[in-house]
Image (tube, grey):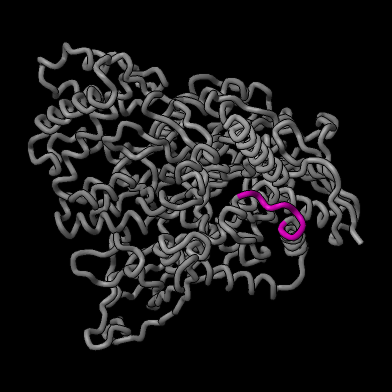
Amino acid sequence: MKKFLLIFSMLIIFAIALAFLLLKNTAPQYSGTVSDTNIKDSTEVIYDKYGIPHIYAKSGEDAYFALGYAHAQERLFQMEMLRRLSSGRLAEILGPKLIPIDKKMLSLGFNEFAKKNADAVLESGETEMLSFASAYHKGVNSFIDNGVLPVEFTMLGFKPDHFVTEDIYTTLGYMALGFTTAITSEPVMQYIQETLGEDYIALFEADSLSAKENFHPNSVKEIIAKNIISDFDAFPYDLPIPYWEGSNSWLLSKERSKSGKTIFANDTHIGYSQPSVWFEAYMEYPGFEFYGYYLAGMPYAIIGHNQNLAWGITIFPMDNMDLYYETTNPENANQYLQNGEWKDYEIVTYNIKVKDSTDYTFKLKKSERGPVLTSAFDQAIQKDNKDVSLWWTLHHKLSMVLQATYYMNNANTIDEFAKAMPMIDILGLNIMYADADDNIAWWATGNLPIRNFKQNSKRYMDGATDTLAHELYSFEHNPKSINPERGYIITANNSPGMYDSVVVPGYYSPGYRAQRIEKLITTQDKWNIEELKAVQLDVFSERDLRLVNIILGEIEPSLLETDEAKELRSWDGNYDIESVGATIFTKVLYMTLNSVFESKLGEQRFSELLHTYTLKANIERLISDENSVWFAGDRSMIINNAYKSAIESLHKQLGGDVQTWKWGSIHQLEHVHAIGRKKPFDKIFNVGPFPKTGTNEVVDKEGFTYSDDKMLKIKSGPALRFFVDFAEPTNGIGIIPTGQSGNIMSPHYSDQAQMFVDGKYRSHIMVKDELPRKRILWFIKGE
């Protein structure tokens, strides 16, 4: 028996060692030589301490080939999942449960958008832009053909196809989905209007009167809760690739900078995941040097800087979607009514391949406006069961976004950079810009639809009587600001108001983050980056302190002397890890929202509403108005009952010692890998969890869905933090949430995770002599 146990133990040890060696072989290659026939001259890639590739080439084609190869060996599975998600091909590798997601993506039309735009750009002729994009894809495909694929492909049992130009556009299409939220907000608003009426919809500014209100064009300060912004409903939370949500950025002129040069700051808010969204790289070849943040499968950086200029982005959540009721012919289900005439739906048939099952046939109907959503999006269906179609600019024009990214990456002056702004057509972006010539600038991009304000674009419109031309304003009408006298520009998804006599409808944030940033940066005349870090990491909520005062003013006097009430009263409004008041307030807030909405909307619609910024942006407006129709005259009773329920729930979940109810014990961040959604793989692929500061709508926005759950899992937050002072443009700093690599065997899989949680930053190295010379990967011409 002893011999048997010894042999058995040795076999287990051998199996573990063999498995480790096999997995180790899948790690990215950080030194050595890669030989390929696509390389013209030897190209050097130096990896820094955090696994960032610094590419030095003799030509742009070689540089972009090396970028594609380096990107693929760290993020190939992320690239593959993104293109499969956006083109409706997840069920092919993940099985029948993914059919509903594939149907949604096929309905949104990213695959058709990609084919149409890829064909057009390829037919336009060979250009440097296409040559570099092609070289990038050759690098990606070289790794697919010759490299060792990461373990996820072995686990799922497939090898990815080569990447092509169409894949760039499916990525852009998915990116566009995160920048316009009508598709998830309007169904809830429509339901409230149809079941409860205009008085109830007014809270969310989706009533007909509120839709016409404007704002002052040059003010960063916004009237609290005056606009709608919508987050996504539960649909994107179930996706293996994160969606975009918000962001902060601000620019300081040389007059407001202690260095005497402009300062740039940006933190993009995106759903957390593992790997994180951004891939960093530095490239240098004759006439070009650039430090950039890249999306999976994109050859050109979306954010970045060189020695002359820097730019970043926040979401400009304009409304470029319209949802329509379609009237179907009762005698022919394939016809719809428009202006008194029955027209045939276009029927598009998709064959969805399904792993370990038979193929699924999906038929998508399209009206002149666009795809009919109701066969894939249950939440779009209302009580009359009419079909609902989607008009979206993405479906009706060729896009120039790829060209825009190329020109932005190659710009060296504000004039060169500004020429790319009109090309950003399908994406609602605030492009924030600063340069070494002392300029600061902001452009709101995306094609703005010309609206008929007699119709409310925040709710469904009637396709049978649709006469809208769906024309678009020229770019000159878009909001912008260049070198304002006040010496700073701030964007945090807040409303631009009326600009150039044009109302800009959208799904904007209530302005809390923009107000807080402005309040902080106007507390002193001049700043440096070290001081501005505290602004980017700020977790104070003035709004929530106002709501605490309302709550304490409504609860019964006998409750005010309890330990729980004392903690709430003494809370300073900061969402620190040690805060007890933050925990109590958040639970009371959820219980109040539950009492107000669930009984009127039902569990499903209330759940949809909770996932939206339509609700989050109007919480203060609701609770501050004791005469709100939603309270039905019982605000005091509702808040009292909510407070009691909250305290009871906290005792059950966290125990009887109130001092242990710390924010960090319930508000936690775990970076979830697509495979790590299933146990026991979460222990292998996920990063975290970490107790985390922050909350919804503070500057360091660590977003979650309000609930009665014991743990408030953070869904989204800064996907990067980034600063440049143009007194030293080669010494920018930044951080990403986990690490550069998506490969579990890389030392850079999670080496920035604790730094990120701790609010630390690291250098953007742009000087070759400052790089360590321990890890160099050479690309040489093959035979």
**Magenta segment, which residues?**
144-151
Residue under the image location 25 percent in, 32 percent down: 589
Q: Is residue 645 above or below residue 338?
A: above
Whole-percent x, y for residue 339 in the image: 29, 82
Whole-percent x, y for residue 198 in the image: 17, 54
586, 573: nearer the viewer: 586
Residue 560 horizontal side relative to residue 273, left or right:
left
638, 350: nearer the viewer: 350
679, 487: nearer the viewer: 679
Q: Is residue 739 above or below residue 375?
A: above
Residue under the image location 38 percent in, 48 percent down: 231
Image quadrant assignment for residue 630: top left
Image quadrant assignment for residue 2: top right
Whole-percent x, y for residue 288 in the image: 80, 47
Residue under the image location 42 percent in, 42 percent down: 494
Q: Is residue 313 visible?
A: yes
Q: Is residue 147 magenta?
A: yes
- Name of the residue lying farthest toward the front: 1
Residue under the image location 36 percent in, 28 percent down: 666
